[in-house]
Image: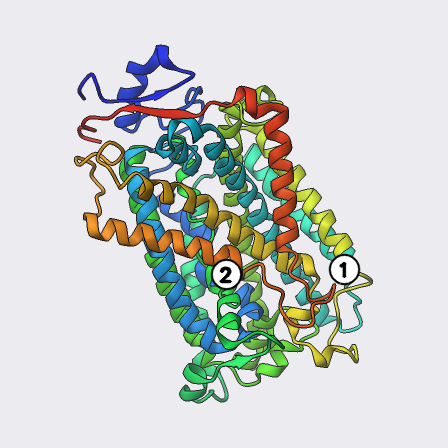
Amino acid sequence: MEQNDAIVSDKAQQTQSAQEQEVWHGDVTSIGNREPHLRKDFNFFRLLALGYNTSNSWLAIATSLALAVSSGGTVTLLFGIICVAFTMGCTGLSIAELANVYPTVGGQYHFTSILSPSRHSRWLSYACGWIGVCSWIAIAASVGLIIAQCVLAMAIYFNPTFDAKEWHYFLVYQVVHLIAIAFNVFLVNKVAWIYTCGFILSLSAYFVISIVCPVRAPAHLDSREIWTMFTNSSAGWSDGVCFLAGLSTPSYMLIGLDSTLHLADECHQPARIIPKAIVTTVIVGFVTAFTFAVALCYSLTDLEALLTTSTNFPVYILWKQATSSIICATIFMVALLVIMLIALNGMHQTASRLTWSFACDDALILARYFNRIHPDLEVPVNALLLNYAACFLLGILYLVSSSGKVTSANDPSFKSFNLIHSLPPAFNAFIGTSIILSTVSIGIPISLLLYQGRSAEYLPATRTFRLPSPIGFFCNSIAVVWSIIVTIFFCFPTAFPVTASNMNYASAVLGIVLMLGVLNWFLSARTEYQGPRLEIVGSIGDC
């Protein structure tokens, strides 16, 4: 590496030369004022396993099925997966290219700091980092709630007299988050192979379910009905708006695409393996999600039964319909539960690393407390506990957002609504908010890359992961447009007239995120946070 090849942190000028060598050769990925305290447990396959576990695309389709089939039916589900795979593929290629040049645990907010005009870099990168941290908290919260729904769906089915109230969901939600936090504190460095096991289990379950369900299904929907019949259940929106709003299920399949970025300090040769892991995650995610969705559609026998199930978990009833066996369907549910618990562990690990990085850059209140790595456990325990506290508060939001209990199919008013309208508003808010925040946090640095004209000053020609210029501009543009579409349409209410029960509270949650971010900025980050800056770039050598 030449002497002028440098990524310079404003707060680490005195260690510039040493950090340049380490960053470009993939030994240190934190470009801010931190040292590597985390164990390097991740090679390419293990990193891919974690990235896939946190998205688990086919499982995301299964668990959020009601969101799509209520907004266009199977047409929205299948063509939505294709649309989202295209847009998120462009997004994945865009951040993979940046990760190859700047392999940093801060990920997108470090990219933003480097790519921004100097006079705007602090507040823009802070905003991106805050959105990124909140996105991972929202993702973990949404998955915790889905796990609770999975557990109680089985309880409701086997005990029809069981009256599932909101506090039941709340308790299960809190228990699974505590399990994930305990795992990340005490076991994550001892059983890092669990993500490999989760990856293998997920793919195995995908193959079994995708084959068994359509083969054993007593009847199949007509192909014309599956691929061309658009069912608008939005009670007021046009078909186009209904389709775009229904893309939340397909979008959920690749949520958290930035997960591997934030494990950079724990990777060997991160500049090489992180871009590969991101792209491979998108490819595997699309193939598994699309083929799984096709298998589900050809296994459907009674769509109305799915949308009026008292379990509030449509895929459970679909599996029962397809296999004609509640035992088989329950085995699938147990596999789903185990896989999602592993995914939740990965989400908390990723979230804690991003929170830790943000604290190391003095962007959080009490940053000196949250940027600590436990000397014996070698994990950011305080960052993990902070994220759990945030998830706990979101659980409280879920608890107070519904009254009495989740609407039952036995309720006389239920038949006039589909399943998506019967769930507590917080559930839809968690899903929508997590998708919006995640997509926007990634879209910010990509938009700045376009602003800089993809200049060689920021993307050296010698980088090993390189998109041809026209393809790069195209992918970057699609990623930015997609982030705008997501932000607008995923805040739309589910139906007209808008009431407290069908209101989309994602916009309200986003408002809370904004207010807390502004408060944290004025209380701490405005005077303390600097963020890394790119001063000079030459060749990245053999990165």
Q: Is residue 310 above or below residue 247?
A: below
Observer-nearest residue: 515 or 303? 515
Residue 444 is marked as none
Q: Secondary structure at mark 1?
A: loop
- The type of residue carrying mark 1 is Ser
Does residue 196 appear left or right of residue 423 in this picture? left
* Dot in front, 1 or 2: 1
Marks 1 and 2: CB-CB under 8 Å? no
Does residue 392 appear left or right of residue 110 in this picture? right
Q: Secondary structure at mark 2?
A: helix
User: Within 10 Å of the Cα at label 2, are there few (<14), some (14-19), or many (20+) other Cα atoms?
Assistant: many
Q: Label 1: which residue?
A: 402
Number of callouts in the render? 2
Which residue is located at x 55 percent, y 48 percent? Answer: 344
Tell me how far mark 1 sits from mark 2, CA to CA. Answer: 24 Å
- The type of residue carrying mark 2 is Ala
Quadrant in the picture for residue 259: top left
Residue 60 is marked as 2
Q: Quadrant of the N terminus?
A: top left
Observer-nearest residue: 393 or 496? 496
Which residue is located at x 62 percent, y 53 percent? Answer: 507
